[in-house]
Image: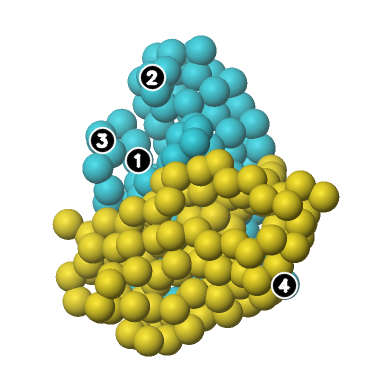
Amino acid sequence: GDSVTQMEGPVTLSEEAFLTINCTYTATGYPSLFWYVQYPGEGLQLLLKATKADDKGSNKGFEATYRKETTSFHLEKGSVQVSDSAVYFCALPYSSASKIIFGSGTRLSIRP
Amino acid sequence: ETGVTQSPTHLIKTRGQQVTLRCSSQSGHNTVSWYQQALGQGPQFIFQYYREEENGRGNFPPRFSGLQFPNYSSELNVNALELDDSALYLCASSPGTGSLMNTEAFFGQGTRLTVV
């Protein structure tokens, strides 16, 4: 069935470092792909999305490109800030589309 | 615009008891989904309600049940609580027909349930 596999955490970086969080997926067809973020004590927020192959989603300095050939949707940011500390989830809508399948999450901590 | 609100924020129950969690959807949203997020894991889909009807269910036993009301708010009921039911329960609302293929789901802050 459809699934999402993402990089295990936790990931700890210094401020202004480059960030990559890997995500690969298995899906029937070509679903949209999402990155959600969960800040401490809060619910999930959609960070960015891409709806078709080769699309690039971007928001708040984060980017991810929908790669059909490698079934990947890696999250990147050129210069992280302390405020980016959170848990990041890669996700896709299930083929029946009534639910979202989430990866296990990657906890990111940024040191000042 | 009011976002998705859930109540209560925290709850402690004893094994075997029953619990009801509540969710008010965002204004204009007619679809509500519930997810269970165990500690250190990603959210797992429980079920979705669209226009007061169940519109998809995940791999959860029948003791997990739900309702959606005419104002699109929703309840999640869990009977015969087990220790493994301890988790963050997230509610998400979305507009449209229930499909999340290209529609954003907006999440509440969740209810932290602890079963002792």
Does residue A6 appear in the picture of this structure? yes
Q: Are marks 1 and 3 in contact (CB under 8 Å)?
A: yes
Residue A92: x, y in percent?
A: 36, 65
Residue B82 is marked as 2
Chain shaded yellow: A
Label 4 or label 3, whichever comes before in sequence order? 4
Task: Check the image and name the residue furthest to the right.
Answer: A112
Amino acid type of disc 3? Pro
Chain shaded cyan: B
Q: Is the residue at mark 2 from the same chain as the one at mark 1?
A: yes
Q: Residue at x 64, y 31 (%)?
A: B10
Q: Residues within 10 Å of mark 1 (few under 14, many from 20)?
A: some
Residue ID for mark 1 = B65
- Of discs 3 and 2, which sits in the foreground? 2
Residue ID for mark 4 = B1
Disc 1 versus disc 3: distance between alpha carbons? 6 Å
Amino acid type of disc 2? Glu
Q: Is the residue at mark 4 from the same chain as the one at mark 3?
A: yes
The answer to whether B25 is drawn above or below residue B109 in the figure is below
Q: Residues within 10 Å of mark 3 (few under 14, many from 20)?
A: few
Label 1 or label 4, whichever comes before in sequence order? 4
